[in-house]
Image (spheres, helix red, strand yellow):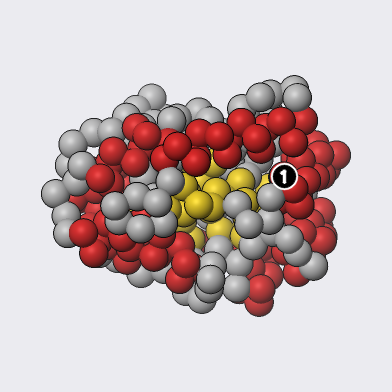
């Protein structure tokens, strides 16, 4: 346990021990998480990222995550990977994975911009199940990929679904712009992961959003737990704010 209490990492991917299966992957991720005092990890996607996954690929990703959760139900929770272009399949996966367990949320990556009308139906079902939506967001310097969402897209979607909690992953990468884009939408949080531990990020996020809307996430194994924890431990904010960011806010979002 850290000096600021237990830690919940809201954003990790099972890319460690690639090819060795869920058991080996889980063991590898837990070995490093234990060093850093991380109690829970929120898993999404599979061992290989696919921008336009087929139905079979989505099922394989979610099965991989489900097995990791089954092996370590006290250490992992999951977001169901969906491709909103496949809307009926997405709604079936929500019922299969979240309504019937063991997943607790939804992960949307690059397949379709989240401000598309297809995503409204996903949000309506998420609201019924009280499932948060972890949405990848970037403001890329050279322009976003086809189907990639920005924090502004999340804010527009969230304004139509105020009963859903959204996590704008990576705070848009260009975090100064991303934080501003979601500031006026109170049901949008940002997480800390996806970029180097740059000075000033956490302080700006707390100032503009309030500590209650900032969540610790590492993006492991693409990023290290330690480098992303440095954004919180090294920030010029109060210890109470650090405790909220490291675990308190996710406990609220997940109703733990």
Q: Nearer the viewer, residue 194 or 168?
A: 194
In this rendering, the count of numbered labels is: 1
Instruction: Tell me if mark 1 has few (under 14), some (14-19) or many (20+) residues whose alpha carbon lies within 10 angstroms of its own.
Output: many
Q: Nearer the viewer, residue 27 or 201?
A: 27
Between 206 and 68, which is closer to the camera in this rendering? Answer: 68
Q: Residue at x 20, y 42 (%)?
A: 234
Helix, strand or loop at label 1? It is: helix
- Residue 93 x, y percent position in the rendering: 79, 56
Can the viewer see residue 139 in this picture?
no
Q: Which residue is mark 1?
A: 68
Q: In the rendered image, is residue 187 in sight? A: yes
Q: Looking at the image, which residue is at 19% across and 46% down?
A: 235
Question: Would residue 220 appear left or right of 240 to someone viewing this image?
Answer: right
Looking at the image, the residue that sits furthest to the right is 56
With 154 as the anchor, is 16 left or right in this view? right
User: Residue at point 82% right, 61% down?
Assistant: 96
Percent position of residue 60, x then y? 81, 39
**What percent of the width, then of the height, locates residue 193?**
40, 40
Q: Nearer the viewer, residue 91 or 255?
A: 255
* Figure quadrant of residue 194: top left
* Residue plotted at (40% across, 65% down): 249
In this rendering, position of residue 91 left or right of residue 5: right
Indicate whether 195 appears above or below 126: above
């Amino acid at each position: 346990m850290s000096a600021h209490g237990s830690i919940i990492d809201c954003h990790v991917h099972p890319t460690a021990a690639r090819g060795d299966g869920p058991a080996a992957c889980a063991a590898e991720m837990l070995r490093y998480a234990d060093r850093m005092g991380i109690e829970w990890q929120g898993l999404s996607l599979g061992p290989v990222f696919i921008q336009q996954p087929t139905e079979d690929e989505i099922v394989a990703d979610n099965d991989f995550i489900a097995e990791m959760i089954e092996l370590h139900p006290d250490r992992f929770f999951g977001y169901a990977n969906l491709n909103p272009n496949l809307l009926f399949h997405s709604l079936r996966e929500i019922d299969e994975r979240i309504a019937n367990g063991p997943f607790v949320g939804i992960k949307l990556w690059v397949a379709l911009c989240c401000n598309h009308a297809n995503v409204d139906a996903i949000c309506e079902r998420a609201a019924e199940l009280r499932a948060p939506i972890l949405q990848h967001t970037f403001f890329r310097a050279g322009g976003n990929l086809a189907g990639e969402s920005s924090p502004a897209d999340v804010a527009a979607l969230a304004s139509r679904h105020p009963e859903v909690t959204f996590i704008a992953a990576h705070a848009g990468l260009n975090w100064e712009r991303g934080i501003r884009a979601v500031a006026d939408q109170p049901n949008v949080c940002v997480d800390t992961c996806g970029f180097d531990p740059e000075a000033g990020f956490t302080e700006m996020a707390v100032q503009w959003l309030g500590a209650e809307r900032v969540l610790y996430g590492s993006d492991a194994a693409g990023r290290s737990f330690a480098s992303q924890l440095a954004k919180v431990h090294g920030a010029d904010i109060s210890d109470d704010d650090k405790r909220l960011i490291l675990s308190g806010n996710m406990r609220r979002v997940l109703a733990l």
